[in-house]
Every structure is written in C-alpha cells, then in structure tokens.
Image (spheres, rainbow, N blue to C red):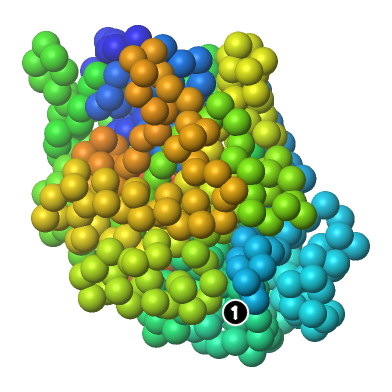
Amino acid sequence: MPAHEGDPGRRAYDVVIVGGGHNGLVAAAYLARAGRSVLVLERLDHTGGAAVSTRPFTGVDARLSRYSYLVSLLPSKIVRDLGLDFRVQRRTISSYTPVERDGRATGLLVGGGEARTRQAFARLTGGEREYEAWQRFYGMTGRLAERVFPTLTEPLPTREELRRRVDDEEAWRALFEEPVGVAVEERFTDDLVRGVVLTDALIGTFADAHDPSLRQNRCLLYHVIGGGTGAWDVPVGGMGALTDALADAARSAGAVLATGHEAVRIDTDGRGAEVTYRTADGEGVAAARHVLVNASPQALAALTGDAPPAPAEGAQLKVNMLLERLPRLRDTSVDPREAFAGTFHIAEGYAQLATAHAQAAAGELPAAPPSEIYCHSLTDPTILGPDLVERGCQTLTLFGLHTPARLFAPDNDAVREDLLKATLAQLDAHLAEPLADCLATDADGRPCIEAKTPLDLERDLGLPGGNIFHRDLAWPYAQDGVGRWGVETPHANVLLCGAGAVRGGGVSGVPGHNAAMAVLEVLAG
C-alpha cells in the first residue's frame, strides 16, 4: 500500500478509527458496509499492524508473517460477513517435542492420526496412561471451546451466565478458578507431557504454572477455545493475506484508509469528537460522532488525556528464518518435514519452564531458554518464490518464552544477541547438524535470520512493553466497570477496539467486530 494512501477530504465522519491494524480494519469494514462514513487514520505507511507479511531479507523472495503468524481466534462469522478472500490451512501435525532419555534421542509426536499419537505416547512414557489423560483433558477443553467461542461475538455474558453455558464444573474449576498447574499436575505425571500442555498458558505471558493471578489460565483459555476446536491454522499467503483482504473489504465498502496519518489527540464531550492527526505536511482535524481506538489502553489514555493504566510488559522473543533445507534430527524416527510442520517445542519440559521463569523473575536470562518453532512453508509454500521452492528452501518461525522486557533494558542489542545464541543452542542440542549450516543467505551474503525482542516490538509497532496482547488477557465475561461489549471507555463515544479490549488478544478481529456492533446499536437508536 503506498505511503499516505487516502485523503480524509471531508472533515466530518460518522466514525473515525485510530489505527489500521486488523481489528481497526474489521470495524471499518462492518461500519462502512452498514452505510456509515468511516475514516481510518494509520501512523505507518501501510495498514495491518502486527498482522502483516513482509520480505525481511534483502533480495530474497520470501514473504513471511513477520509478527503474528498463526490463526485460531478469528471467527468464521467475520470472514463470511465481510466476504473476505481469505482461508487457512490445517497443519497435519500438532506438535513434536524432542528430548533425551536414558542417553537416547527421542521425542513426542502429536498428530498424524489417533493410532500414531497413541503409539508416540507409549514410546515416550512406556504405557497408555498419559495418552488417556491427554485425551480426557483435551476432550474437556474441546467441549468448553464449543460453548465459549461463540460468545466472543455476542454481548458479554456475566460470569454466572458463562458458567452455566460451560455446564462443566470440572472444566470451570480447572480453567477459571485454580492455577492451571493444579490441573496439569493432577492429570499428568510425565514431565515432558506436562510441559507441552503448559506451554499454551505461557504464550506472550510471563507467569508460573501456579501464579495466583491466573493470568496463565486466561492465556490457556484463549489458546484452547479458538474456532470452537482449539486448532491453530496457517494463514494461506501469510498473515498479510488477511489484512490485505480486510483493507480491500473496508475500502470497497467506502471507508477511507489514510496511511501516514498519526492521531495525536482526541477531544470529546461524549456526543461528538474531534481527532487531531499529524502528517508529513502538517496537522489536520477530523470530526466524528464516534471514535474507535485500535491501539493499546496506554495509547488511548495518551490520546484522551486520561490517567494511564498500569504498565504492560511483553515476555517473548520472535525469530524469523529462511533455510536452504530443514536440519536433520538426532531422533531419526521422525522426519523433519513432520517434526517442523507442527509446533516444535524446545526446552519446554515442565521443570524447565519453571526454572526458566524463576531465573527470568530474578533478573537473569534463562540458561535454557524455552521456545517453539514451526515451518509455515511446509503447509503453505505460496509464501516462497518459485526459485526458493525449487531449491527446497523452508521458513522457520521461533517464538521464545519467559524473556520479559525488563531483561533487555540494559542493552537491547547485546541481550538480544546473547538470547538468540542461547536459544538456538537449545535447538542445536536436538539436531544432527547445526542450524547455522542450514540458513540461507540474502543478496548481501548475510544469514537469513532476524530476531525481535519486546523492546523491538514496542519501537516498531507501539506495543506497550512489547506485550503482544497490549495487557494481561481478560476473562471473557463482564466484570465491574466493563460495558455491554467489553470495548467501552470512560467516554461514551470513544471505544477501544484493539487487543486490550475485553476478549482481545491474538489475530481475532473480535474487538473490531464488537466495537462496530456497539456503535451500530447506538446509531440505530
């Protein structure tokens, strides 16, 4: 999309949306399709926010999902309602977790059919018990997903309404009331299996399994309810395919998408509002009946002049790579094309995760940084140019855990380098050849690898503290001070439609949908 696309032209709109990330585009498309005049103000020279595809390596035709990279929480309702030309592809393998036991390289492969998964559990644990516990646990979360996921695009239920809808006291206790570590330890005995279950509670969330705040429970909840199944799918064409489709839908419905326009202030009396924005050519003002903010709660407070919320902090490392070939594994019973097709867990045993959290909480980089990796191009080769496909090149995306932003404050560049080295060393321990030997090089002869810390994400995307959810995830039910849709703010005609809204986080479009529904209800009288 060209810089400074779109000219606000007119001065007054029904709705001005601050931020052109995927949630802002969802809201714009819904509102414009309902016949409302909509202006989207985006600071960068392109829309999409964190849900974009880029070519990060000089002279290399690999279009990677640079930040957000998998899809689970996007309701098919939004895709249908907006007529999006977008689809996802199911991964054939759920996960592979390598481990050394009794001096032997082995691991746990989940996927490829029930019989094969059962056999993998038996090979690792020596019996049927862990697999049967796995089946019971994910059967429980699957039933919960079917009941909770549809509520995300409805007005917020109360806690008791959601509890009645779940209609499963065991599931409610395990996910909503007790630290998830209790459920994991009650149900599983194998350290590796326990760790694989726990990891979905720690994505972008710095917490211990027994954290009394239950932030890890909320993270697990959002990871197991997606699509009503908990499946995490690959966006065909990369994540940018979704935001390109959303931008097209909003634009074709009549919304004005103004890139290179940074909102700097919102003035409102609760009935009307004015948004002051800045461009390379100076300042302008757009009037609106409603303003939607597709940015963090901190950014919202800065725009309205309200007291800011508590600081947020991210806790992840994101690494993008292009390989000439997938590396061979020490565990020769598994084909790398299967091992890397799902989520490849590294240093994520239950005890390892606890140790890594304790070390990071004490102000140290984890000695064995936990991470998970997957290969987008095995499921969707369309992100690679024909030459790369012919050569057998593959992408790798790595997401590291338990690395809070505070660790990078002394020297972001130096700590990033140290953490990347330690993280890749954990992967190399399970490979039959160093990963570095498999990396492709760009047009300038540099290895095709880039790493992003929480501080990098704060600088590049405006994520507060690099937190990918903008703040701790919230329970998907109404609590004191939360409005009908979970997007309301102290100002009647200013709504939060970003990840920091209730039921925000992840690539979902849910806050955008819900903010649009809230506006349309008001405009309908």
- Give the image location of residue 314, x and y in percent: 31, 56
- Give the image location of residue 234, x and y in percent: 64, 38
* Residue 391 occupies quadrant: top right
**Residue 462 visible somewhere in the drawing:** no
Position of residue 399 relative to residue 192, above or below, is above
Few, some or many residues within 10 Å of mark 1 (<14, 14–19, 20+): some
Frontmost residue, 391 versus 110: 391
Looking at the image, residue 165 sits to the left or right of residue 8; the answer is right
Residue drawn at (13%, 14%) of the image: 280
Frontmost residue, 279 versus 231: 231
* Residue 262 occupies quadrant: top left
The amino acid beneath tag 1 is Asp
Residue drawn at (86%, 55%) of the image: 113
Frontmost residue, 438 versus 175: 438
Q: Kindly give the residue lying farthest to the front in the view shown.
A: 103
Give the tally of numbered discs.
1
- Give the image location of residue 96, x and y in percent: 66, 57
Residue drawn at (53%, 83%) of the image: 181
Residue drawn at (60%, 31%) of the image: 325
* Residue 160 occupies quadrant: bottom right
Frontmost residue, 59 versus 445: 445
**Residue 125 visible somewhere in the drawing:** yes
Q: Identify the residue position indicated by label 1 in the image.
A: 191
